[in-house]
Each structure stands twice: as structure tokens, then as C-alpha cells.
Image: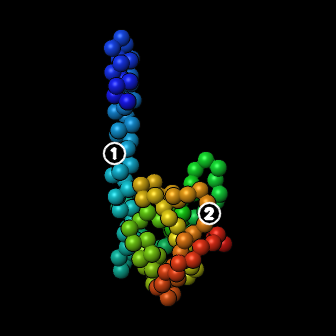
Amino acid sequence: MFFVFYSISKNASFEFIATWLGILIILVLLVARNLLQSRKVFISTSEEGVTLDNGRFYPWNEVTAVKPLEVKLQIYAAPTPGLTLHFKDGKECVVTQRLADYTGFYQELYRHNVPGSKRPLYLYEVDLLTGSKKDMTRQYHSIYYPDKQKTLKQTGIATY
């Protein structure tokens, strides 16, 4: 790529070179941002409640429900599996499966009797950088049962 860029830039104007360098810098910055976000902790739990990445704290009694994101078959992009947390103030928070200790997080929701956390949790092979599935299918590879604290290898299509 450098060779092509160099050979084009030999006879090119300054504006042309500056434009392409600007585009290249933007692409590098976007990739760097995605790498940093993939390692970021988006949510944490404690005995008192849930803390979001913006610093907002919700006590357990203000977490009104947890619902799975429906993994729909999409034409142009892989689906993103995860959960939606609903709070008393009407706000929602999406937690994707790329969260470290995703099943441990779900177990905390179950332990604090958050409505919706008693149902099994479907686990998918996900890209840790984007949070989306590694393939374009709706098929899960395991099911986590919070009441038994067990993950069973099993495939299928989730029913919500």
C-alpha cells in the first residue's frame, strides 16, 4: 500500500497528499479507539447495586428488569447478543456479551432477584472487539442456567 501511495504522490499536489494522509490518520484513530473500548469495563456490580460506565449508580431495587437482546438474522451485519437492563427512572442499559465474566454478571442479577434473570442465558461466539457474533447465524453454542450455575454445551436457535 505504501508503494502505491508513494508512486501516486510523486506527481500529486499537496492537497491530494494531505487529504489521503488525513483519511489514513482518521482510520488509525478509529481502530485505536475500538481497541481501547474493547477493553473498557462498561458496567460493574457490588452488594449495593450496579454502576454504569458514566458513574451512574443504581441500587438493586431500582433495576426493574433484564431482557435478552433478540438475536435477529441480519443481511449486512452479524447480530450482537446481550442483555438490556431496565431501571426505575425509565433508562435502559445494553450489556453485550463481550463483557468480562458475562455469566458472572448474569448470576449477580439472578442472586438479587432481578425480574427476567431466572431464564436461561444463551451464549454465542462473539468478536470481543465489536461485540457482534463471529458468524451471521442466530445459533448459540451454550446455555447458562443461573439456578444451577452451570453452562451446558448445546446448540440451537434461542426462543425468547
| Quadrant, the C terminus | bottom right
| Most foreground residue, 62 or 152 | 152
Label of residue 138 in the image: 2
Task: Give left or right: position of 101 versus 144.
Answer: left
**Vertical relation: 27 (above or below) 127:** above
**Vertical relation: 33 (above or below) 48:** above
Q: CA distance from mark 1 to mark 2?
A: 29 Å
Label of residue 32 in the image: 1
Q: In the rendered structure, are the residues bearing label 1 and label 2 in contact, judged by CB atoms less than 8 Å apart?
A: no
**What is the three-letter code of the residue carrying label 1?**
Ala
Quadrant assignment, res 3: top left
Quadrant assignment, res 118: bottom right
**Foreground tag (1 vs 2):** 2
Q: Give the residue displayed 58% in from the left and 80% down from the top.
A: 119
Q: Secondary structure at mark 2?
A: loop
Q: Position of residue 37 (x, y in %)?
A: 37, 53
Q: Give the residue displayed 43% in from the left and 79% down from the top.
A: 108
**What is the three-letter code of the residue carrying label 2?**
Arg
**Vertical relation: 10 (above or below) 160:** above
User: Which callout, 1 or 2, points at the residue further toward the start of the chain?
Assistant: 1
